[in-house]
RNA sequence: GGCCCCAUCGUUUAGCGGCCUAGGACGCUGCCCUCUCACGGCAGUAGCGCGGGUUCGAAUCCCGCUGGGGUCACCA
């Protein structure tokens, strides 16, 4: 037993770096959780080290397989690949804590043998009473009173049928570490009492298994949420015990990432819709956009560039540049970043990413017909720079996949129509009818309509083309008009103009 | 309450003692471009929480205050 911290912190750099992502599968993947995964991933890729993925499912009450699947889904969708761990394997298998009980049992025995953990029989209520009786604040918690329990006392407790929890004997010294994002942090001696690491039923707690697995798996850099900062002193005490018991060779470096905040001064709660990663996917965020925005929550590539690729992120990322103050999740900024990434997509790539959204909106089936394929190919470049999120696409282009009689004119489109709508439509029909079927192309359409409506009727472009747009799309806002007409073709275009002229 | 963390425009950041008359981005406003909406271009809006030090000089370093957050479980 030592009364000082004897274990050294690791000085691993470069390829020796090993970071990890170790979520508990409870509930939906939270954007804060994913941001943590991202920073770990980025640090591994930046250093040339490795990224480990472990599952901390020691709480059968709250953990679910469904949640586990969602975390995998999220990581795969985002392309945050890992080098070791769940579904990939590695030297420290298994990587789900629910399958590692034997490992913990072994470590517990070692810690008992080295005298770092001891039996504690007092229940919570008894502790409170003890504190009250001794004039000690209840909030102070455990008073370390069983450190030197005699064998007789233990026997007496056992005779009552009680089983002991196991507590770590915390060294009575200041514990200091250098946080990678915050600098030197010290927990004065006595800041926290000896804490429970194993339940009376033999079940190890997070306070034990998390550091034990990190130690056994060789994790060198622990990058995690700020909420764990306060427990770092305890963890270092435990690492020290593991070191002295011969279980590990070093204490990892720690870096505590800032919170992701919601509105006001509160952490983005699980209740907030934007906390749910899949909410953003459903809205039509692309991984590039979401990841870029998440990276901006506490980090920046440079002073004047905030749109970047994952490669750029990996090349430049360093935890020590992470900002320590909490960042607010700003949907508007996130949207802007996403739309910038949508515009950067190769048009064919963009087209294929639209598919799930068009399918779920019922605009196209699982398989595209040849006609649908060609419509989509034609319209994709027209809408690529108009989308903020992919889910906007169905409403914007569904009119191209319908027939004239299926067009429903939306209220706001009707409201914006001029007095002479019918006159404009009829003039438009006349102009287009004189066109050759094979010459029904964007430029020619524009020229014909311009001649008839702008020059001929002396209308303002806005007044001339508004009714046409509404007639063919049913909407106030649409992809460019003449291009849309070309896609629809001469007869369909005229059919729509005529149909709307009859009801307008 | 103990302990810990945080503090620059509305938001996010740049700034690591003089390049700051505090820069960028998003947002917002106006203008230009324009067949709608976008895109793009231009312009504008707005900030160092407070008080003490240290220094020739402080957004930057130190201390205090205030404010915010976290944590003190036989949850993770």
Image (cartoon, coloured by chain):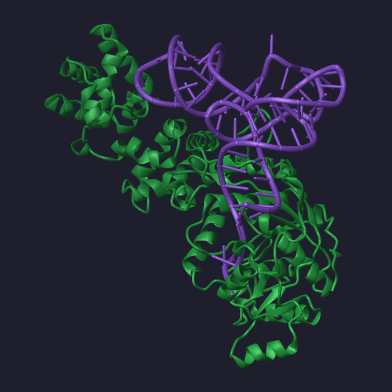
Residue B16 lies, in percent from the top left, at: 80, 30
User: Which hue is chain A drawn in?
Assistant: green
Please provide percent x and percent y for residue A429: 21, 21
Q: Is residue A256 visible?
A: yes
Q: In the image, B35: left or right of B9?
A: left
Of residues A132 and B63, which is closer to you in this image?
A: A132
Which residue in the rendered view is the most extreme toward the bottom?
A159
Number of on-image labels: 0
Side (left or right) of A367 relative to A19: left
Residue A385 versus residue B48: which sits nearer the camera? B48
Residue A82 lies in what quarter of the image? bottom right
Q: What residue do we see at 49% from left, 64% from top?
A: A67
Q: Residue at x 29, y 10 (%)?
A: A460
Task: Name which quarter of the figure residue A127 lies in.
Answer: bottom right
Residue at image coords 31%, 39%: A398
Rendered-image quadrant of the N terminus of chain A = bottom right
Quadrant for the C terminus of chain A in the image: top left
Task: Tell me, by letter, which chain the rendering colours purple.
Answer: B
Between A282 and A102, the one nearer to me in the picture: A102
Q: From this viewpoint, which residue is outermost toward the left?
A: A502
Q: Is residue A345 above or below residue A139?
A: above
């Amino acid at each position: 037993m030592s009364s000082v911290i004897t274990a050294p912190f690791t000085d691993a750099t470069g390829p020796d770096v090993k970071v990890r992502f170790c979520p508990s599968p409870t509930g939906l993947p939270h954007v804060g959780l994913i941001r943590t995964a991202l920073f770990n991933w980025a640090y591994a890729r930046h250093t040339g080290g490795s990224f480990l993925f472990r599952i901390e499912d020691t709480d059968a009450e709250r953990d679910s397989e469904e949640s586990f699947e969602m975390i995998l889904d999220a990581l795969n969708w985002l392309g945050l690949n890992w080098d070791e761990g769940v579904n990939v394997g590695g030297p420290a298998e298994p990587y789900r804590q629910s399958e590692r009980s034997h490992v913990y049992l072994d470590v517990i025995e070692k810690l008992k043998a080295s005298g770092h953990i001891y039996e504690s029989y007092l229940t919570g209520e008894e502790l409170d009473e003890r504190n009250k009786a001794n004039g000690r604040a209840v909030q102070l918690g455990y008073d370390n009173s069983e450190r030197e329990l005699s064998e007789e006392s233990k026997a007496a407790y056992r005779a009552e049928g009680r089983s002991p929890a196991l507590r770590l004997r915390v060294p009575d010294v200041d514990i200091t570490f250098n946080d990678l994002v915050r600098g030197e942090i010290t927990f004065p001696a006595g800041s926290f009492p000896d804490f429970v690491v194993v339940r009376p039923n033999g079940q190890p707690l997070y306070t034990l298994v998390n550091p034990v697995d990190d130690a056994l798996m060789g994790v060198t850099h622990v990058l995690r949420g700020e909420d764990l900062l306060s427990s770092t002193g305890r963890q270092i005490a435990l690492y020290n015990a593991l070191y002295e018991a011969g279980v590990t060779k070093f204490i990892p470096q720690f870096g505590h990432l800032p919170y992701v905040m919601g509105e006001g001064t509160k952490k983005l709660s699980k209740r907030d819709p934007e906390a749910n990663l899949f909410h953003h996917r459903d809205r039509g965020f692309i991984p590039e956009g979401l990841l870029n925005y998440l990276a901006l929550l506490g980090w920046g590539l440079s002073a004047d560039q905030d749109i970047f690729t994952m490669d750029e992120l990996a090349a430049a990322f360093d935890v020590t540049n992470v900002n320590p103050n909490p960042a607010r999740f700003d949907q508007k900024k996130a949207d802007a970043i996403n739309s910038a990434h949508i515009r950067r997509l190769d048009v064919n790539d963009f087209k294929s990413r639209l598919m799930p959204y068009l399918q779920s909106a019922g605009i196209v089936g699982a398989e595209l017909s040849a006609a649908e394929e060609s419509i989509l190919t034609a319209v994709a470049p027209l809408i690529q720079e108009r989308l903020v999120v992919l889910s906007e696409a169905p409403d914007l282009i569904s009119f191209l996949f319908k027939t004239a009689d299926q067009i429903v004119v939306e209220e706001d489109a009707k409201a914006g129509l001029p007095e002479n709508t019918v006159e404009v439509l009829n003039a438009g029909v006349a102009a287009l009818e004189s066109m050759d079927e094979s010459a029904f192309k964007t430029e020619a359409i524009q020229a014909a309509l311009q001649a008839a409506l702008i020059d001929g009727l002396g209308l303002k472009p806005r007044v001339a083309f508004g009714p046409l747009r509404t007639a063919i799309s049913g909407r106030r806002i649409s992809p460019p008009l003449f291009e849309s007409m070309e896609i629809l073709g001469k007869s369909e275009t005229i059919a729509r103009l005529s149909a709307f002229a009859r009801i307008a």
